[in-house]
Amino acid sequence: MTQYAAQAKTNLLALVGFIAAFVIPLAGVILSIFARRQLDAPGNTESGRGLARWAMVIGILGTLAQVTFFILWFSLFFRAVA
């Protein structure tokens, strides 16, 4: 009988951070930073480093897009009001 090695468990913060990066980008960045700290801890056997890394990238790009959008929106709004 062949036995298979148990698959590494995915870090929950990395998964939640990845999902949050699409909805609330700043929360995705923060959660992925915490996930990376947990994953880099000695003795940790969880997987999810790539998930946390991509959550950071997507979160940073999404945050920059949101900030750009709000700056543009406020400038157009105040130009229309004045």
Image (cartoon, grey):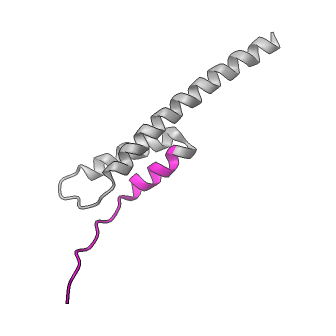
Q: Which of the 4 quarters of the picture holds residue 70?
A: top right
View extreme (top): residue: 82
Left or right? Give the position of 41 relative to 77: left
Q: Position of residue 72 (x, y in %)?
A: 65, 20
- Image: magenta residue range: 1-21
Viewer-nearest residue: 41 or 8: 8
Q: Let me know if residue 64 is in the magenta part.
A: no
Q: Give the residue drawn at x 42%, y 46%.
A: 31
Q: Position of residue 50 (x, y in %)?
A: 34, 49
Q: Let me know if residue 10 is in the magenta part.
A: yes
Q: Is residue 12 visible?
A: yes
Of the 4 image quadrants, the one containing the N terminus is: bottom left
Residue 76, above or below 44: above
View extreme (right): residue: 81
Q: Position of residue 23 (x, y in %)?
A: 57, 45
Q: Give the residue drawn at x 36%, y 44%.
A: 53
Q: Is residue 30 visible?
A: no
What is the tally of numbered marks visible in this picture?
0
Q: Give the residue drawn at x 31%, y 47%.
A: 36
Left or right? Give the position of 76 relative to 44: right
Residue 66, above or below 76: below
Left or right? Give the position of 78 relative to 14: right
Residue 54, above or below 12: above
Q: Give the residue drawn at x 69%, y 20%.
A: 74
Viewer-nearest residue: 1 or 60: 1
Q: Position of residue 34 (x, y in %)?
A: 36, 46
Of the 4 image quadrants, the one containing the C terminus is: top right
View extreme (bottom): residue: 1
